[in-house]
Amino acid sequence: MMAMFGAMLWKEWLELKRSYKLIIVPFAFAIIMVTLPITMKLLPALIEQDLPEGTVIVVPESTASDIVGGIYANFEQLGLIVLILVMMGTVASEREKGSASLVLSKPIGRGGYIMAKWLSYSMLSVISFLFGMALTLYYTRILFDGKMEWGAIAQGTLLYLVLILLCVTLTLLFSAIMRSAIFAGFLGLGSYLALTKLGQYLPDAIEKYTPSAFLDSTAKIMLGQEGGILAPLLVLLVLVAVSLFLSIMLFKRQEL
């Protein structure tokens, strides 16, 4: 059984290679993330260019800490959308084309089919994010002054990977149960945004357990500040596990 799962996982990696996703996703993540330090470095000069002659505006120069603090926000605007666009048809499209039936005619089982896809896209997303983060920190260190808390940055980066896994799992869930890849992507993005943004409107006693609180705490930790992370981290891990379990259970009930 393990040999069959390994073959299925290898098939997924070959598919990622053939579709150029192994190149597209890391490259897209890197471009999205590295634009932050470059843009912030050029921003004062660009503003001065557009001002009428004789106008003086003092633009505070960004520091390394400012850039580090804005990495997550910059990535969430486009990075997760790229990930969802790449993933949203991973099951839905195969069902529509009939290739899912062909694959599942082998003794892999629907659970193994979903797990292979989850693991392959999780690895792709994590590696791509770490690649983009490394480039962003490299340019930040070159372009800006200021102390960088490398230990805190490493800890915050590892924590943020859990949010990426949540996005992967939610997108896979809706791709497994919806026949439309576009609708699956829309629901994946909507559910992720709801979980990570709406918590801030809840009472503090509840909000501190939400993915929204986790995102805020992770950003603070990355800057070397204190952040209550354990409770929302546990909730987030449960959400990932439940979403993955639902993906398998609901996909088993789908007609191919």
Image: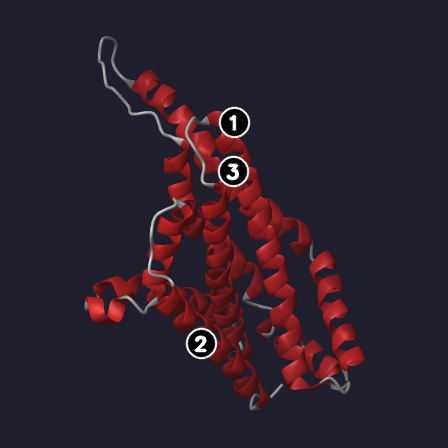
Q: Secondary structure at mark 2?
A: helix
Residue type highlighted by circle 3: Leu
In the rendering, at what x and y percent does residue 19 appear? Answer: 69, 58
Relative side of 255 to 143, left or right:
right
Q: Identify the mark at residue 238; answer none if there is no mark.
A: 2
| Disc 2 from disc 1: Cα separation | 39 Å
Residue type highlighted by circle 2: Val
Closer to the chain start, of discs 2 and 1, is 1
Colour scheme used in the picture? secondary structure
Question: Is residue 81 or residue 245 the one in the foreground?
Answer: 245
Mark 2 near mark 1, Cβ–Cβ under 8 Å? Answer: no
Identify the residue at horizontal 36%, vertical 29% (top origin): 62
| Disc 2 from disc 3: Cα separation | 31 Å
| Residue underneath mark 1 | 142
In the rendering, at what x and y percent does residue 146 appear? Answer: 41, 29
Residue type highlighted by circle 1: Ile
Residue 63 sits above or below residue 255 on the image: above
Identify the residue at horizontal 58%, vertical 68% (top origin): 89
**Structural crowding at the residue carrying mark 2, measured as other residues with C-alpha within 10 Å and reported as few (<14), some (14–19) or many (≥20):** few
Quadrant placement of the C terminus = bottom right
Identify the residue at horizontal 41%, vertical 45% (top origin): 74
Closer to the chain start, of discs 3 and 1, is 3
**Structural crowding at the residue carrying mark 1, measured as other residues with C-alpha within 10 Å and reported as few (<14), some (14–19) or many (≥20):** few
| Residue underneath mark 3 | 137
Q: Residue furthest top?
A: 54
**Structural crowding at the residue carrying mark 3, measured as other residues with C-alpha within 10 Å and reported as few (<14), some (14–19) or many (≥20):** many
Q: Residue furthest bottom?
A: 253
